Image (tube, rainbow, N blue to C red):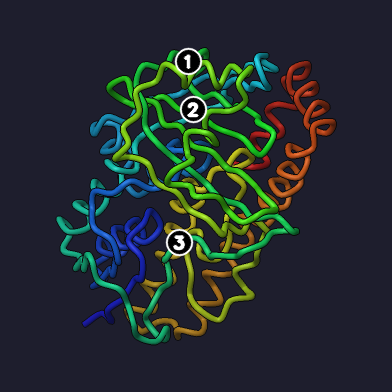
Amino acid sequence: MPENVTIIGGGLAGLTLGIGLRRRGVPVTVWEAGRYPRHRVCGEFISGNGQISLARLDLLDGLRSAGACSARSVAFFAGPTMIVEHTLPEAALCISRFELDQLLARQFQRLGGELRQGARWCGEFGEGIVRASGRRAEPLTDGWRLFGLKVHARGISLEADLEMHFVPSGYVGLCKLASGEVNVCGLFRSKATVPDLAQRWRDWLGGPAASLLHSRLAVAHFDEDSFCSVAGLCLRPQCAIQRNECCVGDVFTMIPPVTGNGMSMAFESAELAIEPLVKFSHGELTWQDVTLEIASRCDERFAARLRWAAWLQRALFQPRARSVLMFLAARSEWSWRGIFERTR
């Protein structure tokens, strides 16, 4: 009888890992403190290698059938001006986390997985237990407090499938979704105490008065039930090998949103963990060896990507460096593709 694997956290990484293990006959229990469906702070598009992982796990067609749409163009803006517009080297897949998490949860249960919603894990982390509980909270990153906001809106006209608007305190991404909705998601930094996000989210997401972002959102109809926020984000690259626990997804590291794709990393890290956990379940690997192998696989896959993303994130928060990067991206297709491929 295979050993049970317990996954703490029913986000993208946890549910995808659970699905992959159930397809290999491993008994799995997922503990999730929240309930589905729910909104999450997320760019809500999947680019790069994440789609390859989804295809190998036989999940990609299901997402498309559930209404995921393709994004092929991206444009960057500062104030009232478009800086650069490009076609994505590979089309991204856009889908609301409200729909995606529930779709994955149902698939996990259809495969015979045990899902405990509204249940917070209070036990120890030891043999057979995988931590997939999401972002690590950290009050300061190089003296800055980082926080994210997300809300869905209608009535917004986009010039590209994905838009990135740079604002003085961070950046706001607009992503088309199915049924005419647009996901509005921003990452901001502040050296002061994080403001009352529930009351002031429109001010942060709306951008400066003279910006194109401001005029875009001034006519939008917001779905206030979709608003969510997260604070205490840590964007410093971390190595999985430094953790004593078996981890997948954002729990060991988070890539800066504009320079990478955290959704893809969640799917990829889940796929990387399946084979070692199957071997553990069948008694072919010790838990210590499993933990080490998963960490080594993740570090090998993501280390260079995280270094590039961290460097780009710092540059994008500095207007002069950002101008140079945007100039190179506008003038050189090779530069644009190089940046995209190295961070995804």
Look at the numbered discs 1 and 2 and tell me whether their residues touch, using CB distance below 8 Å. Answer: yes
> Could you say which quadrant of the image residue 295 lies in?
bottom right
23 or 113: nearer the eye? 113
Are circles 2 and 3 on residues that touch, CB within 8 Å?
Answer: no
Classify residue 101 as left or right of residue 56: left
Q: Which residue is mark 1?
A: 158
Residue type, label 3: Gly
Q: Earlier in the sequence, mark 1 or mark 3?
A: 3
Secondary structure type for disc 3: loop
Q: What residue is shown with label 2?
A: 174
Q: Amino acid at mark 1?
A: Leu
Counting other residues with Cα less than 10 Å from the Cα at mark 2, is it few (<14), some (14-19), or many (20 or more)?
Answer: many
The answer to which of marks 1 and 2 sits earlier in the sequence is 1
Residue drawn 17% across the image and 59% down it: 109
Query: Does 243 sit left or right of 225 as displayed?
Result: right
Q: Residues within 10 Å of mark 1 (few under 14, many from 20)?
A: some
Quarter of the image for the C terminus: give it: top right
Residue 85, given in percent of the width and then of the height, sits at: 63, 16
The percent position of residue 204, horizontal first and vertical second, equals 55, 36
Residue 120 - label: none
Residue type at tag 2? Leu
Q: Which residue is mark 3?
A: 134
Q: Residue at x 62, y 47 (%)?
A: 256
Using a 10 Å C-alpha cutoff, classify the residue at mark 3 as few (fewer than 14 neighbours), some (14 to 19) or many (20 or more): many
Q: Secondary structure at mark 1?
A: loop
Disc 1 to disc 3, how far (Cα)? Answer: 31 Å
Q: Is residue 60 above or below residue 285?
A: above
Specify the quadrant of the image occupied by residue 187: top right
